[in-house]
Image: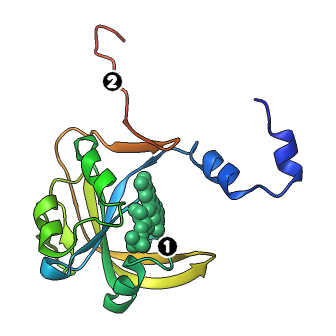
Amino acid sequence: MTAVTGALLAEPDVTTFRTAMGRFPTGVTLLTQGSGEDTIVMTLNSLTSVSLDPLLLLVSVKADGRMLPRISRAGSFVVNVLTEPQRDLAQEFCRPDRPEGHAAMLRLAAEEGVTGNAVLPTAEAYFECLVDAEYRAGDHTLLIGRVVALGQNTTASDPLLFHRGRFGRLPAEPTAEAA
Ligand SMILES: Cc1cc2nc3c(=O)[nH]c(=O)nc-3n(C[C@H](O)[C@H](O)[C@H](O)COP(=O)(O)O)c2cc1C
């Protein structure tokens, strides 16, 4: 491995940090709040499992964006883990002009979950959460969600991935003959 030396001594800049973090591959989700005419949605990859007892997860949400005040006020949200065929949704719902309200529900073929928020029955999995805690961290806010309901796809898994600024998929598993 090369080119780490100088970076250890100097304070890294934003571009270097983003590029380096981009080397950490993640899944991709849609964060949803509200349903029907109140639906708001955002592409998010900062999902982390936190605790099994109680069931807690964490998402990091831009502090001055549209999602955070809505989630803080309502006290709940849903994280929907996307499949590779849902790549278009990930690209659409990170834009400033992304659909909201009924248009978003229709685009996602979403249903109202038990927390009153939009869930995607076609997602790899979804986690319905009540806000357990909020921690301001720089220009983002860490939301700890207590998972009160979840769903998962029972068919073969083909999750959407994000790596080095690009969407991708897991390589196909080798067939028995090729292995
Ligand atoms: C792959 C991907 C992952 C993202 N992950 C996050 C995230 O974890 N947290 C976040 O606040 N924004 C994330 N974003 C950016 C949001 O989707 C969105 O563009 C941004 O927060 C816009 O906020 P606003 O329109 O509500 O102001 C991600 C975007 C992409 C393309």
Q: Which residue is mark 1?
A: 62
Say if 101 sits above or below 170 in the image.
below
Between circles 1 and 2, the one closer to the viewer is 1
Amino acid at dot 1? Lys
Q: In the image, what residue occupies the spot 16% across and 42% down? A: 155
Contact between labelled residues 2 and 1, with CB atoms less than 8 Å apart: no
Say if 47 sits above or below 136 in the image.
above
Q: Callout 1: few (<14), some (14-19), or many (20+) C-alpha neighbours within 10 Å?
A: some
- Front in this rendered view, residue 133 or 23: 23
Residue 2, horizontal then vertical, whole percent: 78, 30
Say if 21 sits above or below 104 in the image.
above
Residue furthest out toward the top:
177
Q: Callout 2: few (<14), some (14-19), or many (20+) C-alpha neighbours within 10 Å?
A: few
The quarter of the picture where the N terminus appears is top right
Mark 1–mark 2 distance (CA, rounded to whole Å) = 36 Å
- Front in this rendered view, residue 107 or 55: 107
Say if 142 sits above or below 96 in the image.
below
Q: Which residue is mark 2?
A: 173
Q: In the image, what residue occupies the spot 35% across and 91% down? A: 73
Using the image, tell me which numbered label, if any, was put on residue 119. none
Q: Is residue 54 visible?
A: no
Q: How is the image coloured?
A: rainbow
Which numbered disc flags the more N-terminal residue, 1 or 2?
Answer: 1
Left or right position of 102 against 98: left
Left or right position of 36 against 65: left
Amino acid at dot 2? Glu
The quadrant holding residue 125 is: bottom left
Q: Is mark 1 within 8 Å of ligand 1?
A: yes
Q: In the image, what residue occupies the spot 31% across and 76% down? A: 77
The quarter of the picture where the C terminus appears is top left
Residue 34, horizontal then vertical, whole percent: 22, 80
Q: In the image, what residue occupies the spot 49% across and 44% down? A: 165
